[in-house]
Every structure is written in structure tokens, then in C-alpha cells.
Amino acid sequence: MTVSDSAFGQVVRDLRREQGLTQGALGVAAGYQGGAGVTVSRIENGLLEPSADRLEGIATALGLTSRDLLDLATARAASAREQSQNGIESFDHRIAVIQEVNERRKSLATAYRAYTEAGAAADSSFLSPFRAMAARIEGIEVEEAPHAEDGRGGDCNARAEASYQLRLTTYGVKEALARSSRIGSAAGTSFDSFAEAVALSTVAAGAAAASASMTSAMSGLGTALNVASSLRGARSTSWLAVAGGVVAGALVAALTASGAKRTRKQRQILDEELLKVEEQIADTQPGLDALLEVLPTATKTLNYIAVHAGHALDRWDVVGASGHGDWRNLGDLGRSQYEAFAEIAAAQVAVQTISVRDLVESRGQELDRTKSLVDEVLTQSWERVTQQV
């Protein structure tokens, strides 16, 4: 392709919007497979040049020939050069990019709402009734806390660290359930209260690693504190309103001036406003994109727990007509089923308290590490749940 990627992308975006097509619809019509919408987004933002076949597909989908499309892009590039030579900067493309980001943030808000609703359903259908049942089983036994060397070494990768985090969370869940058994009360307490109890147990488990080597002990305690922090703080949603609102507010100012003839002073003011928005987008969008990637998996797991684990729990009656049971009288099968439900409960807690804030606020390599760890926690939680029910 001999024209500017940026000019070509602007022309494709304008034509797509004129015809009421989404990026995904255009991408599929042009012949792209998985991630068609993302690919078109990259083309429209001047980040990707389509192959000859895909160029033809895009043009056909827009009702043009590839030659027509390239001619329009050439004319757009020439117009941009003329404006630049006259000292007049075109803001249309920059405003379009901001609009695109704003739409993605709306999608993120929808995805996050689905995630929280799935968490509420899993809590109502499975976790809350399981906790109430555990409170009526006397003498629940819990194995030793997992040591750091069981899943987290000195040069641990994301998979090993996620495995150890889930071990800690499982221990914390079992301890919290056993504690409710001893005091005979769990019904009526909120998910947040239960997560707090699990957090306290994970810290205790991390401290218990002091019986191992000092390096392993500190590693284990550090992981435990990270897990506890996630359990206690990941459910705040205020960051989401802030992240979306900053862009939306600045976007209004930019759009107000869009398309009008501007004096040099007005162009300077608009340029400054756009720069503020672009800097904010560059700083926050990678984390928000990472969150948008992981939320569907988290939501799928929570919905699976709500339906399948909830049904399995309904069929499991270990307390009988008396309303109470004894750990020693459950038998191997009963205790095994309890352990399976405890594993599911731990997976739910881990998924329902993923490090949302860490994803949004991390940058660079730290974001990559956080995303890898969250991906592994979600993957292993899904595997754990589907293996049990």
C-alpha cells in the first residue's frame, strides 16, 4: 500500500460509521477471523497495514473497489499535508481515537457489571448456603497450612505463584469454615465479611512458613499478605467511574469545538485539552484493556459455580433432618465431598477478588506480571471448579 496508514485508517473509520457497521462486522466481512474487531481497530488507528487480499475485502465490504478506497486515502493524506503546511492541525482523527476509547470504557463498565452480578449469583446459590451448612457440622478438621516451598520457589513463574495463592486461599477458606463450625454461626454474614476472615487465615498461614528457611518464609508471608490485600480491597468499583469519567469529561470539551472554524488561540486551547486526554489514555488504557480481557473468564467461572456447584450442593444433605452433623460421622465419601466444595469455594473467592486495582494501576513490566498472574489464577480456578462438578 502506497498511502499513509493513518490516512487510510481514517477513511475506513469514516466509511464504516457512515454505513452503521461495527468494527467486528467489517472485520468479518473483510475475511478476518478471530479478533476481527481488534484488527480493524488497529487498521483504523494506523497501526496495521492490511494485506492485498484483506484490502480488497475491506473495500468490498464498504461497497468500493480497492482502487477507490486507496484514492480516498490519498486525497485524505494530501488534505492533511495542506492543512499542516498552512499551520492548521486537523483534530478529527485524534477526537475519533478518544471516542473509540470511550466506547471501550463503556464496554468495560458493562463487563464489570456482569462480573459482579455473576459473583452475587454464585454467592447466593452456592457459597452462602455452603457456609451455612458448614456451620452446622461439628468438629471440622483442617490440614496444615501450605508452606511456601509447596508451590512458590525463589524463581517462581506465574503458574507456580498462582498455584500457591490458591493453596493459601483454600486453607483460608477451610479455616474460616471450621471457625464458623466451632461458633455455630455463618448464615447472614456477607461475602465481604467471609473474605476478611479468609484474609486473616492466609496471613496466619504465611506466618506459619517461618518453620521453613528464612527465604521461603518471607516469600510465603509476602504472598499471603498479597492475597489478603486482594481479598480485602479488590471489590471497590470507584476507580471504574473515575477512569471513565476523566475521558468522558475531556471528550465533551473536544467535541464541542469539533468541526468548527477555529482561531489560532482556539486551536491552541483544543490542542492542550486533547493532549491532556491523550496522556491520560496512554497512562491508564493498558490496565483497563487488561481488565477487559480477564473479566469474561472470571464471569464464566462464577456463573458456572452459581449453576452447577449450586445444584450439586442442593443434592448434598449431610446434616440431615436434625440440622446438625459431625465431621467424624460423615465417612470418607462425605468428607471427600466437603473437601471438593471447599475447593470450589476457594476458587470462587479467588475469582471474586481478583486484583482489579492492581491491574488498573500497574504499568509496564509490573502490569505484564500482574496480568500473567491473574490469568493463571483464573485458569486454575476454572480447572478446579470444572473438575469438581
Image (spheres, helix red, strand yellow):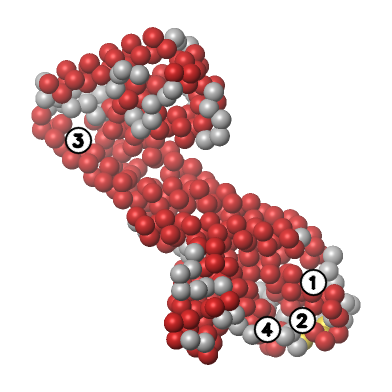
Q: Nearer the viewer, mark 1 or mark 4?
A: 4
Q: Which of the numbered marks, if any, corresponds to residue 136?
A: 2
Distance CA(mark 2)–CA(mark 1): 16 Å
Q: Nearer the viewer, residue 53 or 16?
A: 53
Residue 151 at what x, y percent from top left? 56, 73
Q: Which residue is mark 3?
A: 270
Near mark 3 (Cα within 10 A), the count class, few <14, some 14-19 or many ≥20, is: many
Residue 21 at what x, y percent from top left? 49, 23
Q: Which residue is at the far bottom?
A: 211
State left or right for residue 1 relative to residue 55: left
Q: Residue at x 63, y 74 (%)?
A: 170
- Helix, strand or loop at mark 1: helix
Q: Which residue is mark 1?
A: 337
Q: Earlier in the sequence, mark 3 or mark 4?
A: 4
Residue 16 sits above or below residue 65 on the image: below
- Helix, strand or loop at mark 3: helix
Q: Earlier in the sequence, mark 1 or mark 4?
A: 4
